[in-house]
Amino acid sequence: MNNIVFELNDVCFSYLGKFPALCGIDIKIIQGQKISIIGANGTGKSTFLQILDGLIFADRGTLSFRGQQLNEEILSDAKFSREFRRKVGFIFQNSDVQLFCPTVKEDIVFGPLQLGFANDEIQKRLEKLITILGIQDLLNRPPHQLSIGEKRKVAIASTLIIEPEILILDEPTAGLDPLTSRHIINLLIDENIKGKTIISSTHDLHIVQEISDIVYIFSSEKKIVKFGQPELILNDTVLLQVNNLVHIHSHRHKDKIHIHPHLHSEHHV
Ligand SMILES: Nc1ncnc2c1ncn2[C@@H]1O[C@H](COP(=O)(O)OP(=O)(O)OP(=O)(O)O)[C@@H](O)[C@H]1O
Ligand SMILES: [Mg+2]
């Protein structure tokens, strides 16, 4: 079928051949879908996203991109790789990996310059992103001096400026203040309405409904334990608790501490 962007069959991956990180993953991602991956720390979310982006390669199983096997060989082809990087944008969980230029502005325009975009188009896109992300004052600063949230905004800008058809975001709102998170989510939703495929990982159950048509839960066995529409997943409180996805609140009343789970479904009935 033409509208399948990524298809994974029985994908497994271990780091250094001895640290299992993904096990038996079967997923089909359709063009224009919003997909999210949720799971506790170390369940393989970042590994999965890096496999989709062709940064690491499965030990077992297959991955195809628009019907073509995505492997080391094809990605070493300069023409294919350039096209693939033009179409698929990746935002790392750790922004330090993504930022390497002397100034923020150079970092943001690096990708489009490499891809040969016209200068006036780059300028137009840059101005739009500066406004959305509120990063005007950062443009001439060295990226390594910025706060974690500021770095994240710059990393997001450096990927979005390419306007890729498919956006892969590893915890897009982690470390961002509420207003900036809201701007990013609105932007992702707008991009999806325009037809873009959005694939994200997150721990933030409050954003899952908005950023997902389908949610996948990864378990500590580095497998998919359940997938479905966000309502189905967010209302499965037992599964969310078992998979360490529910916040535990504690309150002190005089000398007693009360601990209870914060059930996300309470906000979605
Ligand atoms: N470079 C590495 N070398 C060895 N093991 C690794 C490496 N990176 C990740 N792992 C292991 O692979 C597993 C999956 O890690 P991954 O980073 O994909 O998890 P995650 O779900 O993204 O976690 P988090 O929520 O903390 O970001 C973990 O058990 C981790 O210890
Ligand atoms: Mg991760």
Image (cartoon, grey):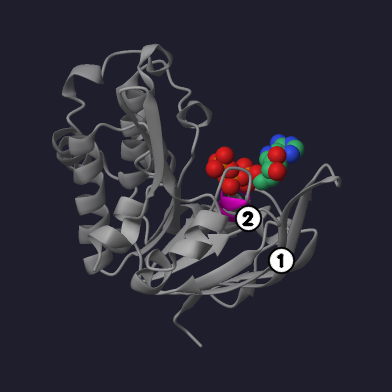
Is most of the magenta stretch helix, strand or loop? helix
Q: Would residue 201 appear left or right of 60 to someone viewing this image? A: left
Q: What label does residue 89 carry, if any?
A: none
Q: In this view, does 152 lie above or below 27?
A: above
Q: Quadrant of the C terminus?
A: bottom left
Q: In this view of the protein, which residue sits in the foreground, 165 or 30?
A: 30
Helix, strand or loop for disc 1: strand
User: Who's the residue at 33% across and 56% down the image?
Assistant: 264
Q: What label does residue 11 carry, if any?
A: 1
Q: In this view of the protein, which residue sits in the foreground, 99 or 220?
A: 220
Residue 166 place in picture, x, y as percent: 41, 60
User: Who's the residue at 57% across and 51% down the image?
Assistant: 45
**Residue designated by label 2:** 51
Q: Are marks 1 and 2 in contact (CB under 8 Å)?
A: yes
Q: Is residue 68 visible?
A: yes
Which is more N-terminal, label 2 or label 1? 1
User: Who's the residue at 43% across and 15% down the image?
Assistant: 144
Q: Residue furthest right?
A: 18
The residues colored magenta run 44-49
The residue carrying mark 1 has its beta carbon less than 8 Å from ligand 1: no
Residue 48, picture quadrant: bottom right
Residue 23, picture quadrant: bottom right
Q: Would residue 15 appear left or right of 42 to someone viewing this image? A: right
Say whether residue 47 is magenta.
Answer: yes
Residue 91, picture quadrant: top left
Helix, strand or loop for disc 2: helix
